[in-house]
Amino acid sequence: MTRVKSPKRSPPPSSNHTPGTEGSGGPVSDTSTTTMTTATEEKGGSPSSSPSSNGKATASNGHAHYHPQGSGPTATKEVVLLADESAKTKWANWSVRTLWTLIMIGGFFGCVAAGPVFVILLVVLVQGLVYKEVISLAAVPSREKKLPWFRAMNWYFLFSTNYFFYGESLIHYFQHVVFVDAFLLPFATHHRFISFTLYVIGFVFFVANLKKGHYRFQFSQFAWTHMTLLLVVCQSHFIINNIFEGLIWFFLPCSLVIANDIWAYIFGFFWGKTPLIKLSPKKTVEGFVGGWIMTIFFGILFATLFLRYPYMICPVKDLTTTAFSGMTCEPNPVFVPVKYYLKPWMVALVRHLGMRNHYVMIAPLQLHTIFMACFASLIAPFGGFFASGFKRAFKIKDFGQSIPGHGGITDRMDCQFLMGLFSYMYYQSFIKTSAVTVGFVLQNAINLKGQEQLELFDHLRQYLIGQGLLDEESCVIMPPKEAWAQLS
């Protein structure tokens, strides 16, 4: 009998077929490919991380996985932790990261000292850069060229969203200005309708530019833009509100995240041996725990130092103030030290240390800082892990290369947004004191009719005269315009 040699089967064409999935032993079947992909995903890798013809792992995010040739069991390539890297590589990376960390910290302190305007501009700048980096992930230039105004719509939605959120903040914290100024009053009273109109214009423009053959792409980009606005711009709005409540509510949360980043890196650099989470393979348990402990210590130190400076603790009432303006205010009770009496066993302990005190003076802020430091160390890093998962989904190592040794702006700010939102919620829930402000009274007074406003003014005038704060001859209600017309 003559044996007929059967021809080789080539893998069926598929949109998911990745070149280079064949090993040296011949083509890989669909079943084998599916098994390898599933095993890769179970080990924390990306489905697109497939072995090349020589058996080496191929992945664009820098955390590749190795798959041996054939259909045998898969093996995960060991990730080299910082503590295990070669001395040359490790210290070169250390030098670059340290230099740019010091530059960023110096710029951060400079903006805080320059005044709230520069701090707000810093937040807006960072927000815009993060928005640009995240939006760029889903960019498809070949399609965008066929869609006029595509990029412009992304930035238009950013503008309209910022107009709404920043307008809300300015109206809330500067009611005593915007509700008195004749030019700003219409914008303040109709702010939300104006914001809605701006958004509707963008929405109509988007629908009018839908193009056949690109519907799926355009709607996916529309959803991507709105998700980015929610995660970036919305959280930035709360950070701006923290600034207006007092610079310390911006400075302290940011400093806690920075301190945690630095100390987690240092502990991982020297002693990190135990991987923490697969999403971020170089993070270690030693760095996580060490960063937590040191962040609490430095948080209490920061709080103790800055609660003494009115510039840091006073709510922002004047945007032109700086660290050298010499401003004063009535401090929030959270900044006033309170006497705490020690337990008998504590008294005995401090006596062995040469101290005779039966009490300690502790500002409530120092206790609140412990909770904030715990969030910055234990929860805020999950913002970074979320970003790591994001990067793995798009097969990239960093969001950008704008900061040497650190990656992009988003790589540095991924924890700050979550921390800023937490700080706002924590402050509003446990620290803020409710009080009637001049702006609140004005906002309600302008809703009264003209005659009611005059009546309110007359009653207030009589009260101030009775309190000796106003001279009886110095304040006279002018007759209405109709009376002047009759006199003329």
Image: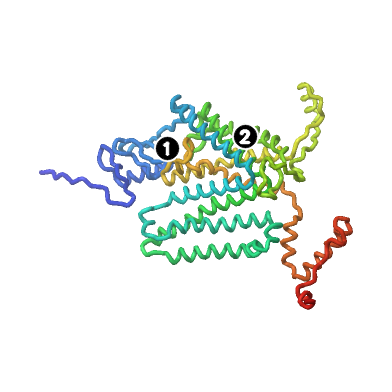
> Residue at label 1?
63
Q: Which mark is residue 295?
A: 2
Q: Where is residue 435 in the image (x, y as percent from the top left)?
A: 76, 53
Q: Nearer the viewer, mark 1 or mark 2?
A: 2
Image position of 215 (left or right of 55):
right
Vertically, is 4 above or below 274?
below
Q: Where is residue 18 in the image (x, y as percent from the top left)?
A: 32, 46
Vertically, is 388 above or below 341?
below
Mark 2 Cα-neighbour bin, 10 Å: few <14, some 14–19, many ≥20: many
Vertically, is 285 above or below 434?
above
The answer to whether any part of residue 278 appears in the image is: no
Image quarter of residue 32: top left
Classify the position of the C terminus by image quarter: bottom right
Q: Where is residue 97 in the image (x, y as percent from the top left)?
A: 50, 33
Instruction: Name which residue type carries label 2.
Output: Thr
Q: Residue at x 39, y 35 (%)?
A: 75
Viewer-proximal residue, 369 or 484? 484
Q: Position of residue 361 (x, y in %)?
A: 78, 34
